[in-house]
Image: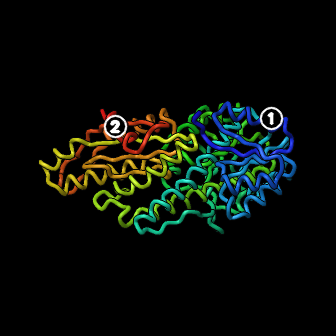
Amino acid sequence: MIRLANVLIVDDNSGHADALVQRLGLGNYHAVVARDAAHGLSHARQEHPDLVLAVSPDPISFSAALKTDPASCDIPVIVIAETVTPDLCARALEAGVDDVIAIQCDDDELFARMRPLVRLATMHAELRYRAEAAQGFCVVARDRVGAPENALPAILLIGDEAARAQAILADFCDITLSDNLYEAEGLLTQRNFDAALIAFDDEPEGLLGFCSQVRNNPRLFNLPMVVLSGADAVEAYRRGATRVLPRPVDAVVLRSVMLTLVRRQQLRWTIRGALNDSLQGAARDEETGVYSRAFLDAFLANRLEAAKSQDRHLAVVFFASPNVDGVRRQFGDDAALHLTQQVGQWITGLLRAEDLTAAYGPAEFCVVLPDTPLAEAEVVMHRIAGVLAYTDFAVREVYQPVKVWVQVGCTDSRSDDDMDSLLARARKNLD
């Protein structure tokens, strides 16, 4: 069965561990259990799981050891506890833990909080795969990075209660205040924030809609959003909240949560920058500025074999613009090239950092989406196609807006696929 992620559970209570394995299976997570810290650390070094759940006997000490080992320090780790206390949150922050979750939380919350950490693991893996492929093109690219040190976080505090949180958070971050959701939405489009905190004394009707709006924005879908709420936490998680904390919230808990999420977001920014290391030399298509067809072939061959051997999702999407030839005939080669470059830039800009865009043919692009089910890939495909189709492109020396026709095709990998069959099936679906 295709799995969303490989999870290591470290727990010396076999009954609890087996129950957690079954629970994760409901969400298509494959889990294995280590009964003690030594076996857990050994498994993490050798197998490099996507996520670690540290339960007992001493999850903080285990997590600290995991995070200080160069072979496993990039693996996200969640501490699972009977009770989440301020002291536990403070110690977890110090140990480099990525989240602390109460075992009693429901599945919706558990999976919602696991999901961004699994995507973080995907970003780390993508960095390794691209660096490996880049070697064949004499391109040196980083295969591992850590969070930047001493980088001042930028946090947006939203709501009439947010000012109270300012006193708790002001000493470690650059704070911007907004007392309403409309203004906050505008601020989020004007600059990059490492996290947002939403706190209203009387929650406005559009709060959950705001969460959905941010989460569905291609520029903002990774933004950590913490909601201080007395409302239904499950619905808030479904609508895109990263963390939901009850009011009133303990100052230590709030500080720990915000610092942890900021650290995670800054790590994402660092990985995003490192992913571009490989986009140079022969790995880069000179005309469009995206990855070259040769790099796609080298990269996808390894990605496909990994997906098949690990039972992971891998989706491929094609975008073609057949009317670029018409633009060439009417306005010349430079206009056609400029339009094609812009289409490639728009596609890349509407994707996640871990998704790869490559030039495949004239006015044709191939996108590789790792760890992405077909249904999700189709949503991404149609969203990007819609944006492209309704965009008026400004082309050099063409004194009128230019539209592109968009053809799309999508497929996911199968156990008997090779690279040629995977790409052929995706292109066959071009409509």
Q: Nearer the viewer, residue 431 or 5?
A: 5
- Determine the residue located farthest toward the front in the rendered image: 416
Question: Residue 81 placed where, x, y %?
Answer: 83, 43
Badge 1 is on which residue? 104
State which quarter of the image contains the C terminus: top left
Q: Nearer the viewer, mark 2 or mark 1?
A: 2
- Determine the residue located farthest toward the left in the rendered image: 330
What residue do we see at 62% from left, 63% from top? 146
Classify 229 as above or below 296. Answer: above
Residue 182 visible in the shown view: no
Residue 142 visible in the shown view: yes
Question: Residue 327 placed where, x, y %?
Answer: 17, 47
Q: Amino acid at mark 2?
A: Val
Mark 2 and mark 1 lie on one chain; the one further toward the N terminus is: 1
Secondary structure beneath label 1: loop
> How many marks are shown on the rendered structure?
2
Question: Residue 39 placed where, x, y %?
Answer: 79, 52
What residue do we see at 18% from left, 46% from top? 325
Cα gap from disc 2 to disc 1, whole angstroms: 44 Å
Q: Nearer the viewer, residue 292 or 338?
A: 292
- The answer to which quarter of the image holds residue 207 is top right
Is residue 350 shown left or right of residue 221?
Answer: left
Badge 2 is on which residue? 408
Secondary structure beneath label 2: strand
Classify 375 as above or below 118. Answer: above
Question: Residue 256 placed where, x, y %?
Answer: 75, 54
- The answer to which quarter of the image holds residue 93 is bottom right
Q: Amino acid at mark 1?
A: Gln
